[in-house]
Image: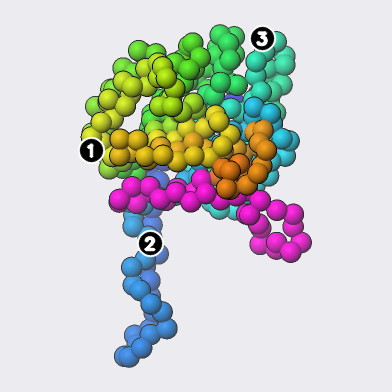
Amino acid sequence: MKKIRFLFLGMVLILAGCHTAGRSLHPFKAPAYSTAKPWRGDRFANDKKSFQFVIIADRTGGNRPGVFEQTIHKINRLQPEFVLSAGDYIEGKTEDDSLLAAQWDDFFDALEPLQMPFFCLPGNHDISNPFMQQAYIDRMGMTYYHFVYGNVLFLCLNTEDPPATHISEAQIQYMEKALQDNQKVSWTMVLLHKPMWKYKDSAGYEKIEALLAGRPHTVIAAHEHRYQKETRRGIDHYVLATTGGSSALRGAAFGELDHIVWVSMTENGPLLANLAVEGIYGDNFRDQAP
């Protein structure tokens, strides 16, 4: 049953497009006031072209049990339209079939309560050798892909396309076609596990950058377990911290905390808000642990 969630990826993408096109908004109605009125502003943030989604960071690379599971339940409270991730779901680094299966089962069990689509891409812990790469493909179908939601193109890259820290020519050609086929989108979101732009040998990423030149886009990576933001060639690049992965947890000033990213896609691009997992409470926070 857990495998079905990912086998139906194509169906999810089709339904996602239908959901955006058919979304019904709630018009505002109030009595007519001849003079003053008890509110300020009349522009509601409910543009039918806008939508909200969540991005999570690394679960593993020194998993701290319970953090990811807690986060899934808290995301359900927020009800984004879908959830993206930037890899590292299991500890990996094994060629033992039973151990690997147990690790994936543990991840799928943790993910099971999520109430909306979850889009994967592999991290180095998920496909650390050829055996694990094939196991990933058996479960997920592919290691890189794209989709369109609303009027936004999402490119989900594989930075372990082997060897490690590498983007293959086949993947570059795939992304080139995805970009050519979707030239009229308003924005492009690029997700990858390793922040390849920071490496001395970008091993194929420079070709991805060239394909994106002149196109409004945002780049989001993970892997380093420490939050960072930089502007590179006029484009915002982010590296996420953790959602359960190893961390000294020294706090926001050090970029070290468990968090999710709440993204509001607007006509002018994405607005990002980082939410600390410990700061998301249910409806009776006096009686609940964070």
- Horizontal arrangement in the rendering, residue 82 relative to residue 184 (left or right): right
The type of residue carrying mark 2 is: Ala
Q: Which mark is residue 95?
A: 3
Q: Name the element at disc 1.
A: loop
Query: Is 118 a magenta residue?
Result: no
Measure the alpha-carbon separation of dots 3 and 2: 50 Å
* Quarter occupied by residue 180: top left
- Horizontal arrangement in the rendering, residue 158 relative to residue 131 (left or right): left
| Within-10-Å neighbours for mark 3: few <14, some 14–19, many 20+ | some
Examine the rendered structure and indicate whether residue 6 appears above or below residue 68. above
CB atoms at circles 3 and 1 under 8 Å apart? Answer: no
Residue 280 or 224: which is nearer the viewer? 224
As drawn, which residue projects farthest toward the right?
287
The type of residue carrying mark 3 is: Glu
To which residue does mark 2 refer? 45
Query: Is 273 a magenta residue?
Result: yes
To which residue does mark 1 refer? 184
Whether residue 82 is visible to the viewer of this picture, yes or no, is yes
Question: Which of the two discs, 3 and 1, labels the residue nearer the N terminus?
Answer: 3
Name which residue lies at 68% across and 18% down.
Answer: 101
Image location (x, y in percent) of residue 176: 29, 22
Name which residue lies at 48% across and 17% down.
Answer: 165
Segment colored magenta: 261-290
| Within-10-Å neighbours for mark 1: few <14, some 14–19, many 20+ | few
Q: Name the element at disc 2.
A: loop
The type of residue carrying mark 1 is: Lys
Measure the alpha-carbon separation of dots 2 and 1: 24 Å
